[in-house]
Image (cartoon, rainbow, N blue to C red):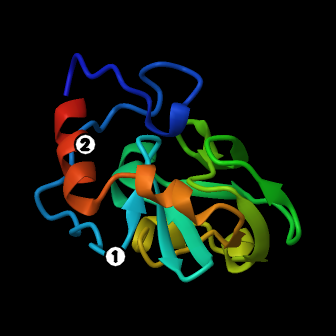
């Protein structure tokens, strides 16, 4: 684990959010119908709408999540730009939009139970979007490519 130099979700202090660099042997598989960013967000597209969250690797690296700050419904997001934060016992990390669009729903249950992200990161969605440019999705990583990326990050 020593010598790991990446920062999950672009944590501001090197080493703070990187105590656990690799996937656990018992970690969940990455859903094949999701696309992934190198900043460790996932997106599941259904036509012109999409659901967004953080990956199991991200939640594992961050540790116990204690607070999630998300945008309001109606907010316009731009691909690659921050749309909120996740606070863990280790760090506060920015969340980055995997695609551009208008926020149509926010998972308000995370306000009272942010630990749900730790329980099942790939089911604990954060926001839903109406995509403004669905073509942006093609530039994201497949589950297989994301797994390789995480393995190379170690």
Res 92 seen here: yes
Left/right of residue 107 with respect to residue 76 in the rendered view: left
Assign the C terminus to one quadrant of the image.
top left
Q: Nearer the viewer, residue 13 or 98?
A: 98
Res 154 seen here: no
Distance (Cα) linking label 2 and label 1: 18 Å
Residue 119, horizontal then vertical, whole percent? 42, 72
Q: Quadrant of residue 4?
A: top left
Which residue lies at the image location 88% right of the left edge and 69% below the top edge?
Answer: 74
What label sits on residue 33 in the rendered view?
1
Left/right of residue 52 with respect to residue 15 in the rendered view: right
Q: Residue furthest left?
A: 25
Q: Which residue is mark 2?
A: 150
Q: Residue furthest bottom?
A: 46
Residue 121, horizontal then vertical, whole percent? 43, 68
Residue 12, horizontal then vertical, whole percent? 59, 24
Assign the N terminus to one quadrant of the image.
top left
**SS label for mark 1:** loop
Q: Nearer the viewer, residue 58 or 100?
A: 100
Which residue lies at the image location 47% right of the left edge and 19% below the top edge?
Answer: 14
Q: Nearer the viewer, residue 2 or 74?
A: 74
Nearer the camera: disc 2 or disc 1 = 1
**SS label for mark 2:** helix
Q: Residues within 10 Å of mark 1 (few under 14, many from 20)?
A: few
Which residue lies at the image location 21% right of the left edge and 20% below the top edge?
Answer: 2
């Amino acid at each position: 684990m020593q010598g790991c130099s990446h920062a999950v979700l672009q944590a501001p202090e090197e080493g703070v959010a990187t105590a656990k660099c690799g996937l656990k042997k018992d970690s969940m598989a990455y859903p094949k119908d999701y696309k992934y960013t190198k900043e460790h967000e996932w997106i599941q597209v259904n036509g012109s709408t999409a659901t967004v969250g953080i990956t199991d690797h991200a939640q594992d690296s961050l540790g116990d999540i204690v607070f999630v700050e998300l945008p309001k419904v109606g907010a316009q997001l731009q691909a690659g730009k921050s749309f909120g934060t996740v606070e863990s016992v280790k760090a506060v990390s920015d969340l980055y939009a995997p695609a551009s669009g208008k926020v149509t729903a926010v998972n308000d249950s995370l306000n009272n139970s942010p630990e749900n992200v730790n329980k099942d990161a790939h089911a604990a969605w954060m926001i839903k979007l109406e995509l403004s440019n669905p073509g942006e999705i093609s530039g994201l990583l497949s589950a297989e490519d994301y797994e390789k990326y995480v393995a190379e990050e170690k």
